[in-house]
Image (tube, rainbow, N blue to C red):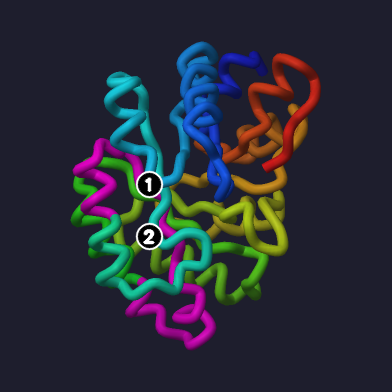
Amino acid sequence: MEDAYILGHVDHTLLKATATWEEISVLCDEAIRYKTASVCVPPYYISRIRAAYPDLNICTVIGFPLGYDAAATKITAARTALEDGADELDMVVNITDVKNGAYEQIKNEISDLKKIAGNRILKVIVETCYLEEPEKVALCRAVTDAGADYIKTSTGFGTGGATMEDVLLFKANIGPGVKIKASGGIRTREDMQAYIEAGCSRLGTSSAIAILTEGAGKGY
């Protein structure tokens, strides 16, 4: 598998709380140079990135990283992000709803955000490290029924990241229109290739370019 092919699946990510504009600029420059699928950045920086990099594909996060914002808050955040110039939204599912078994409410929240996103990509982060297998399966159904574009494993801020077991579970339970994004803890070329071969259309990592160009990653 060619490095360029791998990088074309990568959402080049910088979501740490202390991210500076200088660091964000480096991220964007790298994304353009190495032709990553997108940059995944804090909402605060969207408009500034759009002005400085008008052709860059910008992904941002909604309800990040804990997911328990009110649905109305997520809706407002999504609208603001898109108005500022975001092209893709990665929303965090309401994990408290999962634990309460409120899957209809989860489906409705995802559906509302997809209506706002329209033809732009909506990815749903389910944060697998906090879930039991039946919850993961139920979320595959909710994400599918709500019309989201992707199901995503992790925020990278929880107690664990992507696993092959979860990716294969998703693959067996999502609908045909839903794609998979693996994120969190992806730190080797072998990991990236394995996830793509398993069916992931996107990888969320800050390490891909460093791994493929320098042989060492920076971690998520």
| Mark 1 or 2, closer to the camera | 1
At x 49%, y 17%, the residue is 29
The local secondary structure at tag 2 comes to helix
Q: What span is in magenta?
A: 78-106
In the image, 137 versus 19, the foreground residue is 19
Q: Residues within 10 Å of mark 1 (few under 14, many from 20)?
A: many
In the image, 84 versus 211, the foreground residue is 84
Query: Is 79 left, or right, of 210 in this rendering?
Result: left
Query: Residue 201: x percent and y percent?
Result: 50, 36
Instruction: Reply yes or no: does residue 143 show up in magenta.
Output: no
At x 46%, y 16%, the residue is 32
Q: Residues within 10 Å of mark 2 (few under 14, many from 20)?
A: many
Query: Is 54 left, or right, of 61 in this rendering?
Result: left
Amino acid type for the residue under numbered disc 1 = Pro
Query: Is 101 left, or right, of 107 in this rendering?
Result: right
The local secondary structure at tag 1 comes to helix
Instruction: Reply yes or no: does residue 100 show up in magenta.
Output: yes
In the image, 12 versus 128, the foreground residue is 12
Q: Is residue 149 above or below residue 93?
A: above
At x 64%, y 14%, the residue is 2
Q: CA distance from mark 1 to mark 2?
A: 26 Å
Q: Is residue 21 above or below residue 108?
A: above
Q: Looking at the rendering, in which quadrant would you find the N terminus?
A: top right
Tag shown at residue 144:
2
Amino acid type for the residue under numbered disc 2 = Thr
At x 60%, y 46%, the residue is 183
Query: Residue 137: x percent and y percent?
Result: 54, 69
Q: Looking at the rendering, in which quadrant would you find the C terminus?
A: top right
- Which residue has dot 1 on it? 43
In the image, 62 versus 18, the foreground residue is 18
Tag shown at residue 189:
none
Query: Residue 171: x percent and y percent?
Result: 55, 52
